[in-house]
Amino acid sequence: MNKSLILWFRIAVFNLMLVAFIGVMLRYKIAYALPFVHQKHLLHAHSHFAFTGWVTQILMVLLVSRLYDEQQNAFKKYAPLLYGNLIAAYGMLFTFPFQGYGLYSISFSTLSIFTAYAFAVMYWRNMNRARQKSPGDPWFKAALFFNVISSAGAFALAIMMATKTAHPDRYLASSYYFLHFQYNGWFFFACMGLLAHKLYTWGIRLNNHKTIFWLFTLACIPAYFLSALWLPIPLWAYILVIVAVCFQLAGFALLFGAVRERFGQLRQLISPLGKWLLGLSAVALMIKLLLQSGSTIPALSKLAFGFRSIVIGYLHLILLGVITLFILGYIAINQYMRMNKTAVTGIVVFIIGIFLNELILLVQGAGAISYISMPYTNEMLLGAAVLLFAGLLILNISQRKSSSEV
């Protein structure tokens, strides 16, 4: 096993634990009090570190590992970019809580963006030069493209906050632009590329693979308007939204059918833990696509975006349910981490935390829509956050001790 890969994996999972710890602090401040903590500033640190320190860091590492078979010194070549992204992530973690959007936090945010640019250029070139092509490569290229264009939203936010010219509509539109092309572009397409490449290494090629890729790719850009239906968008944009939703649903249906045809083979190749993690990620993806479909109804969209708990629940569904569970499942089936009883316990606790967090946010959102105050929801959300952190703490401990394998 590549020692560099193991090291970077441990760093990324440690970062995920820090993200969960900040989540506990945020929930504690809402339920009780932390006078010395600026809630909004800490929230910025939480989200930026989650994106850069956890998801982007681990995806960069996993994408580099795709080149490892052909380029033995791949991690050495990419080390400056991996360390650059890590420095940017920790820079944002330690500056946003104290100054919000300010000189230092924006500087580290800019560093993360330019590191992403450099990674995209370098990785694209290496894919083109690789002797052996992979079905995952088109997904990786699309992921890199969406990561680059997502930065327009980040720059717009930084400029508005630094100059104190943020208009509510422009602020939300820029935020959702960045989030959309991170979640549904960079994160999702990179994960799909990893899945396609892993199947390729197993000698499995899914039926309609190219069709699935183009359905999701063509849908990605117009699907941004799903996050902007609360704005007075023109009719042509709304029609594009409907088409994008149909493309995504068709892509998922074809993907599900293709995987089901190969299920007999996959069942023999994937570990029990990997099956659970990937299966739960697929269920979360299906729920996400169904929620997107419902949001095409303007009245429902305005209603959903009007309640914070619903928005937070949706974003966590994607980041934790779809992306993080997939990444952990991918790591498990590739044996990039120790699969001992302690690790499994940590992952199970983490999954329980995700489920409870989503359930409580759903109940809270439903109550808000009905103008019913649900008692103790803040305390229960704090409990769910503690479970998320506890699960990741156990997982991190499992990678540094000897336990019996499972």
Image (cartoon, rainbow, N blue to C red):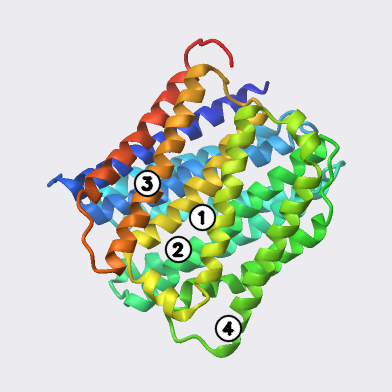
User: Which residue is rendered at x = 45% and y = 27% of the image?
Assistant: 346
Secondary structure of the residue carrying tag 1 is: helix
| Residue 366 visible to an observer of this rendering | yes
Q: What is the x, y in percent for residue 317?
A: 47, 52
Distance (Cα) linking label 1 and label 2: 9 Å
- Mark 3 highlights which residue? 357
Task: Name the N-terminal-most of marks 3 and 2.
Answer: 2
**Circle 4 residues within 10 Å: few <14, some 14–19, many ≥20:** some
User: Which residue is rendered at x = 48% and y = 61% of the image?
Assistant: 179
Secondary structure of the residue carrying tag 2 is: helix
Confirm or deny contact between disc 3 and disc 2 (CB under 8 A). Answer: no
- Name the mark nearer the viewer: 4 or 3: 3
Disc sitting over residue 154 in the figure: 2
Secondary structure of the residue carrying tag 3 is: helix
Q: Is residue 255 above or below residue 266?
A: below
Task: Name the N-terminal-most of marks 2 and 4.
Answer: 2
- Mark 1 highlights which residue? 113
Task: Name the N-terminal-most of marks 4 and 1.
Answer: 1
